[in-house]
């Protein structure tokens, strides 16, 4: 059950998970603009997904994740641009997704117009991270990771702090599962980037 609240004077709207609400791309854009405190997503078939604000633990983990990625991005800004969890992407299959962290090569970023950069960017990131919270369905996150890969992502991490596991997704390769790793390598996609999982797993 997801509760959607527009403002303090509004009545909450409870959307059961089994109730699929379909919206067009234009309707989704309006909803996203009017509900900036919510992380809204839309599947390729038009199903609206409402992600309420994260709790303290998840927010803290995501902070440590994006901080480390941000430091690497600043030192390697010639390679590309990084994005936080509030950034929306319109994937080639038509879905609107907002990874917990992502990165796009400089060439692809610079190929976008100013208008495209200001809205849901019409591309799939080269690198994506999904950080599982206690209420997230692992199966749904795995499906989302597969969707990223099918739409052009080169490297993806599904980080599961509760079980201290990481699933690594690589373009054209089987998923690799790591048990309680201490760090992750950005490999050739993010050369020189190493994510320490100490604070993410201990939060």
Image: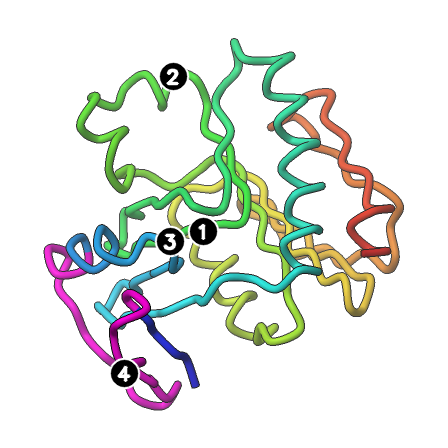
Would you call the spot at circle 2 few (<14 residues within 10 Å), some (14-19), or many (20 or more)? few
Q: Earlier in the sequence, mark 2 or mark 1?
A: 2
Mark number displayed over residue 148? 1
Residue 155 picture location, percent across and down = 58, 41
Mark number displayed over residue 107? 2
In which quadrant of the rendered image does the C terminus lie? bottom right
Residue 34 picture location, percent across and down = 22, 56
Task: Name the residue at the front extreme.
Answer: 9
The residue to which callout 3 is attached is: 97
Would you call the spot at circle 4 few (<14 residues within 10 Å), some (14-19), or many (20 or more)? few
Residue 186 picture location, percent across and down = 69, 32
Q: Nearer the viewer, mark 3 or mark 1?
A: 3
The residue closer to the viewer here, 155 or 118, is 118
| Residue 66 to residue 165: above or below | above
Identify the residue shown where x is 32% and y is 52%: 36
Dots 3 and 1: beta carbons under 8 Å?
yes
Q: Earlier in the sequence, mark 4 or mark 1?
A: 4
SS of the residue under disc 2: helix
Distance from Cα at disc 3 to Cα at disc 1: 9 Å
SS of the residue under disc 4: loop
SS of the residue under disc 3: strand
The residue to which callout 4 is attached is: 20
Distance from Cα at disc 2 to Cα at disc 4: 37 Å
Q: Earlier in the sequence, mark 3 or mark 1?
A: 3
Q: Quadrant of residue 13?
A: bottom left
Distance from Cα at disc 4 to Cα at disc 1: 22 Å
Give the extent of the magenta segment.
6-28
Dots 2 and 3: beta carbons under 8 Å?
no
Would you call the spot at circle 1 few (<14 residues within 10 Å), some (14-19), or many (20 or more)? many
Identify the residue shown where x is 16% and y is 68%: 23
Distance from Cα at disc 2 to Cα at disc 1: 19 Å
Q: Earlier in the sequence, mark 2 or mark 4?
A: 4
């Amino acid at each position: 059950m997801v509760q959607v609240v527009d403002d303090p004077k509004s009545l909450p709207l409870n959307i059961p998970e089994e109730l699929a609400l379909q919206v067009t791309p234009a309707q989704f854009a309006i909803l996203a603009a009017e509900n900036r405190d919510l992380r809204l997503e839309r599947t390729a078939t038009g199903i609206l997904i409402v992600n309420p604000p994260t709790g303290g633990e998840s927010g803290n983990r995501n902070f440590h994740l994006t901080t480390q990625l941000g430091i690497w991005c600043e030192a390697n800004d010639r390679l590309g641009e990084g994005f936080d969890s509030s950034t929306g992407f319109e994937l080639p299959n038509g879905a609107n997704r907002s990874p917990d962290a992502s990165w796009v090569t400089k060439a692809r970023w610079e190929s976008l117009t100013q208008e495209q950069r200001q809205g849901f960017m019409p591309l799939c990131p080269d690198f994506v991270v999904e950080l599982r919270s206690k209420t997230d369905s692992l199966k749904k996150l795995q499906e989302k990771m597969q969707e990223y890969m099918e739409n052009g992502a080169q490297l993806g991490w599904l980080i599961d702090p509760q079980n201290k596991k990481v699933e690594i997704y690589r373009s054209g390769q089987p998923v690799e599962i790591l048990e309680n790793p201490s760090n992750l390598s950005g490999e050739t996609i993010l050369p020189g980037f190493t994510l320490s999982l100490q604070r993410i797993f201990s939060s």
